[in-house]
C-alpha cells in the first residue's frame, strides 16, 4: 500500500472541498499562488506508469453518485422553498445530458492505460497514447503556460501535487491533479472536467503503478530522414 | 627548435597575390538569433540546436552564391570575425520557419566603411539541393547583388586602399611597433592610410607570408563548412519540408476554425469533444514538430560536433602560432632596427 492511504485521503478530501467550492463558483479556478515554487520541484513523477484497473473511479458509479447528489439538492430546494403540492424534483433532461457529456469526455481523456512522464529541472512532459503530451514548463520556478487560439494550458503545484489546468473555449476546463506515493511506486491522477454550460464538474480518479519498460538488445535513435535507426552497437547516424 | 625553424621556413616561402579589383571576403558564421529567454523558444517556434546548425551552414550558401558570381577574390566562411578582412560579412538569423527565411546582414570593409546593414527576407521558392540552388536563392542573390553594387560605387583608389588597410591592420596585430603609425583611426572608428610601407619592406613581406599560412588554415576550416553543408543539406531540406507542412497546417486549421464552426448545442458531448479535439490536434502537431527537431539533431548533431572539434583544434593551432609569430617578429624588428617592439 502506498504511503499514503492517509495522506491521499486527506488530499482527496482537500480536492473534494476545492471541487465543491469550485462547483459553487461554477468553474474550477486557477490559484495564482500555485503557479510558482522555490528551490527544486516539489515532487518527481519521472518514469513509466501503467493503469491499475483495480483502483480508481468507475464512471457509472460516479454518474449515479452525482445524480443522487443533484436529486437530493433538488429535494432540499423544494423543501426549503416551500413549494406547494406535487412539485417535480427530478433532474431535467438537459442537466442529465450535460453531466453525461462531461462524464463521457472525462472518461475518454483518462482512457490511456500508459503514461510516460519525463521530468527535468524545468519541464515535465506527460505522454499519453493518442493524445497530446501534457507539458508543464517552469522557468526559474515560475510556470510558463502554452496558449493558442484553441485553448491554454498551464501547470502549478499544490503542495507536492502537480496540477495541470487546460482552459478551452466556451468555458470548458480540464484539470489533472497528479499525486505520487512516498515510495514512488504509485501515481494517482484526479481529472476534473467542467463547463460553464453546466453548474457541476465531473471528476474521475485513476491510479497507476510504476513499471520498467522492457529493455531491448537494440540501441535506437529517431532521425529525420531515415526515421527510426536501430543498431546492436553504438549508433552514429 | 624544429617548430621555430619550420615557422621561419614558412615565413620565407609563402607569398600572397594582391588584387584590388577582386576583394577577399570573409563571411563569419551567422549569429543563430536565439532569444536569450529560453521560456520564449516554444512560443516563437525557435529550436536552438537547429538554429545553431543553420548559423553554421547558411553562410556557406552565401559563399557559394558569391563565388558563382565570379566577381570576388577568395570568399571564405570563418568561425570568428576577421577584423583585418578586406570585406567582412556578418549575419544574424532573425527568423527561419521553412516558409520564410529572414536574415540581418552587415558588411564592413577593412577601412571600417559599412557597405550594408540590411534585413533580407526570402520566401521559399520551391527549388531544392537537387537543383544545386537553395530554395531561398533569391535572398542570397539579393545580398550578393547589394554587395556588388556597394563595391561598384567605389573607385579604384578606394578599393586599393581597402586592400592596403587590410594588410596593415593585419600587420599591426603582429608587429604594432613596426606598422602602428601607418594608419590613423578617425573619431567614427574608420581607418585611414597615413602612408604606405616600401614595396619591398622585408617585415611586411614576412607578415604576408604569415597571413598566407593563416589563409591555408582558414581554407581548411572553410572546407569543413563546405563538408557540413554537403552533409546536412538533404536532412535540412526534409526539416524545412516538415516545417512548411506545419505552417500550412496551422493556416488551414485557422481557416477551418473560421468557416466550419461546430453547430452542436452548447454543453453537448459533441460540442465539448470538438473543443477538446481542436486543442488536441493543435498540440499534437506542435509536438510532432519538436519530434522532427530532435530527429534532425540526432541525425546531424554528431557530425556537427566532430566538425566543431576539428575547427577548434585548427583555431587553437593558429592562436598558438600567433603568439610565436608575434615574438619572432618582435625579435627580428629589434635586430633590424635596434628598437624593441
Image (cartoon, coloured by chain):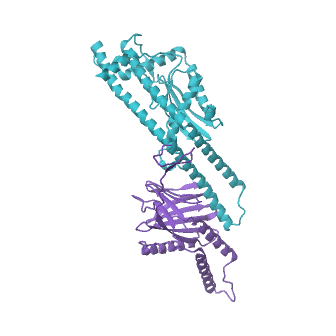
Picture coordinates of residue B206 (x, y %)? 37, 16
**Between B99 and B340, the one nearer to me in the picture:** B99
Q: Is residue B245 above or below residue B90?
A: below
Picture coordinates of residue A66 (x, y %)? 59, 77
Picture coordinates of residue B157 (x, y %)? 51, 14
Picture coordinates of residue B270 (x, y %)? 68, 65
Q: Is residue B301 above or below residue B68?
A: below
Looking at the rendering, which quadrant does residue A165 occupy? bottom right
Q: Is residue A8 above or below residue B310?
A: below
Position of the N terminus of chain A, as image quadrant, is bottom left
Looking at the rendering, which quadrant does residue A95 occupy? bottom right
Chain A rendering hue = purple
Question: Is B62 positioned to the left or the right of B339 in the image?
Answer: right
Q: Is residue A225 above or below residue B78?
A: below
Q: Which residue: 42% across, 10% down?
A: B199
Q: Which residue: 65% across, 49% down?
A: B249
The chain coloured cyan in the image: B
Evaluate whether residue B132 shows in this view: yes
Evaluate whether residue B34 shows in this view: no
Amino acid at each position: 500500500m502506498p504511503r499514503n492511504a492517509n495522506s491521499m485521503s486527506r488530499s482527496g478530501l482537500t480536492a473534494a472541498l476545492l471541487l465543491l467550492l469550485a462547483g459553487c463558483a461554477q468553474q474550477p479556478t486557477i490559484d495564482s499562488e500555485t503557479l510558482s515554487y522555490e528551490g527544486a520541484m516539489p515532487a518527481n513523477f519521472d518514469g513509466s506508469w501503467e493503469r491499475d484497473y483495480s483502483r480508481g473511479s468507475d464512471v457509472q458509479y460516479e454518474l449515479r453518485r452525482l445524480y443522487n447528489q443533484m436529486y437530493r439538492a433538488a429535494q432540499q430546494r423544494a423543501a426549503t422553498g416551500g413549494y406547494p403540492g406535487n412539485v417535480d424534483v427530478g433532474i431535467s433532461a438537459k442537466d442529465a445530458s450535460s453531466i453525461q457529456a462531461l462524464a463521457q469526455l472525462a472518461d475518454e481523456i483518462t482512457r490511456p492505460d500508459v503514461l510516460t512522464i519525463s521530468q527535468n529541472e524545468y519541464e515535465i512532459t506527460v505522454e499519453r497514447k493518442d493524445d497530446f503530451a501534457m507539458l508543464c514548463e517552469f522557468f526559474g520556478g515560475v510556470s510558463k503556460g502554452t496558449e493558442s487560439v484553441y485553448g491554454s494550458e498551464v501547470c502549478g503545484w499544490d503542495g507536492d501535487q502537480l496540477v495541470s489546468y487546460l482552459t478551452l473555449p466556451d468555458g470548458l476546463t480540464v484539470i489533472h491533479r497528479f499525486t505520487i506515493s512516498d515510495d514512488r511506486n504509485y501515481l494517482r491522477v484526479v481529472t476534473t472536467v467542467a463547463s460553464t454550460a453546466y453548474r457541476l464538474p465531473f471528476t474521475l480518479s485513476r491510479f497507476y503503478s510504476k513499471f520498467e519498460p522492457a529493455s531491448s538488445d537494440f540501441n535506437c535513435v529517431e532521425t529525420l530522414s531515415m526515421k527510426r535507426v536501430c543498431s546492436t552497437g553504438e549508433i552514429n547516424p | 627548435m624544429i617548430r621555430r625553424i619550420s615557422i621561419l621556413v614558412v615565413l620565407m616561402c609563402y607569398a600572397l597575390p594582391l588584387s584590388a579589383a577582386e576583394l577577399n571576403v570573409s563571411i563569419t558564421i551567422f549569429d543563430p538569433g536565439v532569444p536569450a529567454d529560453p521560456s520564449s523558444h516554444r512560443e516563437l517556434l525557435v529550436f536552438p540546436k537547429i538554429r545553431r546548425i543553420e548559423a553554421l551552414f547558411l553562410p556557406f550558401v552565401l559563399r557559394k552564391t558569391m563565388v558563382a558570381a565570379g566577381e570576388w577574390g577568395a570568399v571564405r566562411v570563418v568561425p570568428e570575425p576577421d577584423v583585418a578582412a578586406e570585406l567582412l560579412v556578418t549575419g544574424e538569423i532573425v527568423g527561419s520557419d521553412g516558409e520564410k527565411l529572414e536574415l540581418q546582414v552587415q558588411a564592413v570593409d577593412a577601412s571600417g566603411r559599412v557597405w550594408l546593414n540590411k534585413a533580407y527576407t526570402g520566401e521559399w521558392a520551391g527549388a531544392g539541393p537537387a537543383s544545386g540552388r537553395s530554395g531561398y536563392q533569391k535572398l542570397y542573390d539579393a545580398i550578393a547583388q547589394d554587395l556588388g553594387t556597394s563595391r561598384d560605387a567605389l573607385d579604384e583608389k578606394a578599393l586599393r586602399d581597402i586592400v592596403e588597410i587590410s594588410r596593415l591592420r593585419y600587420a599591426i596585430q603582429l608587429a604594432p611597433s613596426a606598422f602602428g603609425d601607418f594608419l590613423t583611426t578617425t573619431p567614427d572608428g574608420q581607418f585611414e592610410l597615413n602612408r604606405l610601407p616600401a614595396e619591398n619592406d622585408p617585415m611586411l613581406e614576412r607578415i604576408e607570408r604569415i597571413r598566407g599560412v593563416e589563409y591555408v588554415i582558414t581554407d581548411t576550416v572553410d572546407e569543413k563548412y563546405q563538408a557540413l553543408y554537403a552533409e546536412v543539406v538533404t536532412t535540412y531540406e526534409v526539416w524545412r519540408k516538415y516545417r512548411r507542412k506545419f505552417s500550412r497546417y496551422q493556416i488551414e486549421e485557422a481557416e477551418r476554425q473560421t468557416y466550419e464552426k461546430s453547430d452542436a448545442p452548447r454543453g453537448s458531448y459533441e460540442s465539448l469533444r470538438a473543443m477538446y479535439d481542436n486543442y488536441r490536434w493543435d498540440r499534437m502537431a506542435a509536438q510532432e514538430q519538436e519530434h522532427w527537431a530532435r530527429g534532425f539533431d540526432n541525425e546531424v548533431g554528431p557530425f556537427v560536433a566532430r566538425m566543431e572539434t576539428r575547427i577548434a583544434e585548427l583555431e587553437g593551432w593558429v592562436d598558438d602560432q600567433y603568439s610565436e609569430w608575434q615574438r619572432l617578429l618582435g625579435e627580428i624588428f629589434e635586430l633590424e632596427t635596434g628598437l624593441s617592439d
